[in-house]
Amino acid sequence: MTDGEEELAAAQHAHWQATYADHPGMYGERPSAPALHAAAAFEAAGATDVLELGAGHGRDALYFARRGFTVRATDFSATGLEQLRRAAREQGLAERVTTGIQDVREPLALPDGSVDAVFAHMLLCMALSTREIHALVDEVHRVLRPGGTFVYTVRHTGDAHYATGIAHGDDIHEHGGFAVHFFPRHLVDALAEGWRLDEVHAFEEGELPRRLWRVTQTLPAPRPRPGLRSTPRNAPTE
């Protein structure tokens, strides 16, 4: 990480901590539209556990838990995660939701192939360099089980805020204290290398409105090698 990246990362961490402290539950209790899609996709894939990156105060993590998933919710804001834990206790979901502080610039604190599904709503388009985004998606690839599903959303270069505000380079622009990495389409395609890209869905959200892509991609399951028996070695035969 360069000095400039470290300075921006520290400023964004302080900004989000203050924002959650000043505006508890700032996104409300209703789940985001991408979370509704993700839950259906995860259920269709047979997932039982979900890792959410950038969970904030937890509106989507709590929704996944209400749908019956076991959820590990991570964020780099301890303030946001405390609000999430409090809401989980109040809603009787504490046994289904665990939390952990995670700076996604660092390796994910999970073993290889340990989760069924990963969700990240506008986390990849935070103040991360292109190199850091690639490294993060590699980490998601590592922790997912074969056949696992990854759903993420990002603001893209068709957004009205793109190329305006304070420019930090690498398609990162800052407005009102929030730095955003706006995605060109070729970055989405590059991040899908080694995956099956199931869908890139354009949608709008919030004021302005923000213009985003919702990306769904799957980690391919290994194909059986030709000539291998399809029954267990010690299975009885007639």
Image (cartoon, rainbow, N blue to C red):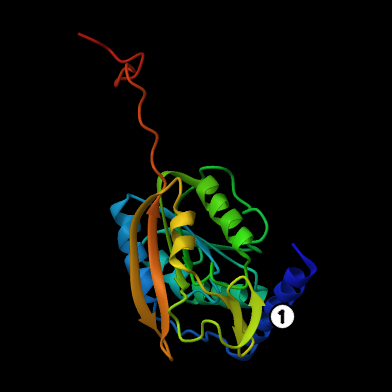
Residue placed furthest toward the top: 238
Q: How many numbered circles are shown?
A: 1
Q: Residue at x 19, y 8 (%)?
A: 238
Q: What amino acid is at disc 1?
A: Ala
Q: Secondary structure at mark 1?
A: helix
The residue drawn where x is 74% and y is 74% is: 10
Is 205 left or right of 173, judged from the image as shown? left
Query: Residue 212's quadrant in the figure?
Result: bottom left
Q: At 51% from the left edge and 77% from the top edge, which residue is drawn?
A: 87
Classify 10 Å Cα crowding around label 1: few (below 14), some (14-19), many (20 and above). Answer: few
Residue 92 in view of the camera? no
Front-most of 145 and 210? 210
Pinpoint residue 67: horizontal percent, then vertical percent. Answer: 35, 64
The answer to whether 129 appears left or right of 217 in the picture is right
Q: Position of residue 174 (x, y in %)?
A: 61, 84
Q: Quadrant of residue 65?
A: bottom left
To which residue does mark 1 refer?
A: 14
Q: Nearer the viewer, residue 90 or 131?
A: 131
Quarter holding the N terminus is: bottom right
Residue 14 drawn above or below residue 116: below
| Residue 156 placement (x, y as % from top left) | 46, 74
Q: Position of residue 187 (x, y in %)?
A: 49, 61
Left or right of 127? Residue 223 is left
x 61%, y 90%: residue = 176
Q: Residue furthest right?
A: 3
Can residue 201 be seen in this snapshot?
A: yes
In the image shown, does 56 or 99 lie closer to the viewer?
A: 56
